Image (cartoon, helix red, strand yellow):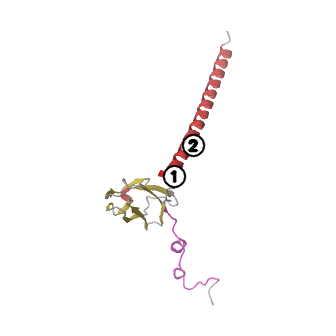
Amino acid sequence: MDVTGTVKKVVAVNLRYTSLALNLAKEYIKAFESAVREGVASADGAAATGEGGTHKPARRPPLLLVGELDQEATGAFALNNTSDRDLNVALIVQGELDPAQVQITPASVKLPPGTNTIVRLKVKLSDALEEGRDYAGAVLAPGLSTQVVEFVVRRLAASAEKTSPRSSDTPANTKGADQNP
């Protein structure tokens, strides 16, 4: 009995088995992803229409809070109480940022029926935030129909005005090409 030939056959069988298992897993994942996408699409379609087939407003776009290092990025959004009862709402911050970095004013609010309030967001742009990277977050308002307000924080690169030397920083005895004699 040839041991080398037997080992080769066993290895070939194992490789075919592994290949088939990977292909099946790949097909399963594709089918699962397709089913999830179709389910989400049909759920979005159902959520977009209310009772009687009326169309609900589209999801609001996220707030964009931007600024340079050591600046405070700010934004605001409205909370509306469209119900027929008083609502006490304690706002919650979630996302990639530490909730302590995001200041919400007011942090909690009592809304009588049919009223609204403006909520402000403030984020101090520190060295802890990478330049040019988006940090996603959300403010949750349990009890309201628009329970989630998404936001994105981005620290911009320092502006050219701050990084370029001023003309007063150049020595007095040198003249640039654009200076008069």
Q: What secondary structure is marked by label 1? A: helix
Q: Circle 2 is placed at which residue position?
A: 38
Specify whether residue 136 is painted magenta. no
Q: Position of residue 29 (x, y in %)?
A: 57, 36
Q: Main secondary structure of the magenta part?
A: loop
Name the amino acid, label 1. Answer: Gly
Residue under the image location 50 percent in, 61 percent down: 131
Relative side of 113 to 35, left or right: left
Residue under the image location 62 percent in, 22 percent down: 14
Q: What secondary structure is marked by label 2? A: helix
* Stretch of the chain drawn in magenta: 153-177
Viewer-side label of 1, 2 = 1
Q: Circle 1 is placed at which residue position?
A: 53
What residue occupies the far bottom of the structure in this picture? 181
Specify whether residue 160 is painted magenta. yes
Compared to residue 30, the image places residue 121 above or below, namely below
Q: Residues within 10 Å of mark 1 (few under 14, many from 20)?
A: few
Q: Could you tell me if residue 17 is visible in this image?
A: yes
Compared to residue 71, the image places residue 167 above or below, namely below
Q: Position of residue 88 (x, y in %)?
A: 31, 57
Question: How far apart are the alpha carbons under marks 1 and 2?
Answer: 20 Å
Q: Nearer the viewer, residue 20 or 158?
A: 20
**Which quadrant of the figure has residue 177?**
bottom right
Name the amino acid, label 2. Answer: Glu
What residue occupies the far front of the structure in this picture? 52
Compared to residue 45, the image places residue 151 above or below, namely below
Q: Nearer the viewer, residue 34 or 5?
A: 34
Relative side of 142 to 181, left or right: left
Residue 137: numbered disc: none
